[in-house]
Image (cartoon, grey):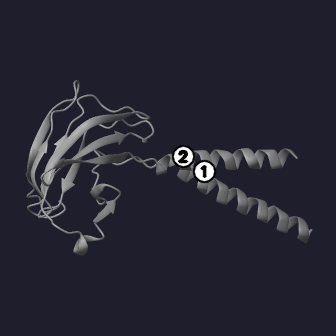
Amino acid sequence: MKRIILAIVFLATCLGASGTALATPSLSWTVADLGSGNWQYNYTITNDLIGQAIDSFSVDFAYGLYDALQVDPLPAGWGSSYAASPWSDSAGPQNGAFYGFADPGQAIAPGSSQSGVAVSFAWLLSDFGPLADEVTTSGDQAFTYTTVPFNEPSTAPVPEPGTFLLLGVGLAGLTGYRRIVQRRQN
């Protein structure tokens, strides 16, 4: 009985340690129709990382779909914002794409969220046919841009204890199997 309880505790520890590698920040948004072909995205960023604060985030906008991008005034306590500007980095989504950025000023602590960042823009397309994989219609909102890339300030560290625990489970299993085989041979 003691071995079974020890095995259950060991497996629970392994599962608990491996869950931290799956934590990621999330970026959600709503769409508001400002009229005359102008729209606004209102963003909320949630920090689901364990033990790591988010210092900044960025959102890329595809060239040819948006025009007149403007990062609206940020809420009190937020740092600087940068108006949308052409993106000329070859590592970016594509040369000439628009880029909007907001710096929360204070780091977003793990388990908390920030909202209040809004980007206004003009939508350049008149129909949604050829862009079905990027644009969807939902209720009274004309579209939702579903492929907003989210750039994390740094990658989440892979927890080494989880790796060692997985190795330990394998070695413990091999040791147990070896003992069973030796007992049957004797």
Answer with left or right where residue 162 lies relative to residue 70: right
Residue 112 is situated, as x and y percent measured from the top left of the image, at 40, 33
Distance, label 2 to label 1, CA atoms, is 6 Å
Answer with left or right where residue 96 lies relative to residue 76: left
Residue 71 is situated, as x and y percent measured from the top left of the image, at 14, 41
Disc 2 residue type (three-letter) = Pro
- Using the image as rendered, state which of residue 122 and residue 110 is in the foreground: 122
Residue 138 is situated, as x and y percent measured from the top left of the image, at 35, 59
Q: Which residue is painted at 78% across and 64% down in the image?
A: 177
Tag 2 near tag 1, CB within 8 Å: yes
Q: Which residue is mark 1?
A: 165
Q: Which residue is painted at 14% across and 37% down in the image?
A: 81
Answer with left or right where residue 35 lies relative to residue 163: left
Q: Which residue is mark 2?
A: 161
**How many marks overall?**
2
Label 2's element?
A: helix
